[in-house]
Image: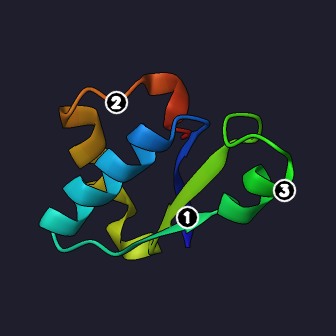
Amino acid sequence: MRLLLRTTDPTLIAFAQALLSGEGIAAFEMDVHMSILGGSSFLLPRRLMVADRDHFIARAVLVDNDFPPDCLPQ
């Protein structure tokens, strides 16, 4: 699994998952419960992971849909 997206914005995570699902790419959201335990869903960033083989295409999908570059680690 490789990190595709890191953000504190839950709407970006949901949008990314919808886009990737439409392309047939499985994505797994991490740190959901940690942000809830921290007392705020906007305090700790959530991560979206994809399989190594899908990372290049998944990143291209998000870049084509104008995701903020600071949310997309190299």
Identify residue for label 2: 67
Q: Label 2, secondary structure: give it.
A: loop
Identify residue for label 1: 2
Q: Label 3, secondary structure: give it.
A: helix
Three-letter amino acid code of the residue under disc 3: Leu
Mark nearer the N terminus (2 vs 1): 1
Three-letter amino acid code of the residue under disc 1: Arg
Identify residue for label 3: 37
Residue at the extreme right of the image, as rendered: 38
Q: Specify the label residue 25 is tagged with.
A: none
Mark nearer the N terminus (3 vs 2): 3
Mark nearer the N terminus (3 vs 1): 1
Asked whether, in this view, residue 65 is left or right of residue 53, the answer is left
Location of residue 74 in the rendering, given as x and y in whole percent from the top left corner: 54, 40
Foreground mark, 3 or 2, reads 3
- Front position in the image: 55 or 41: 41
Query: Residue shown at 49%/37% (left/top)?
Result: 72
Q: Tags 3 and 1 in contact by the CB under 8 Å rule?
A: no
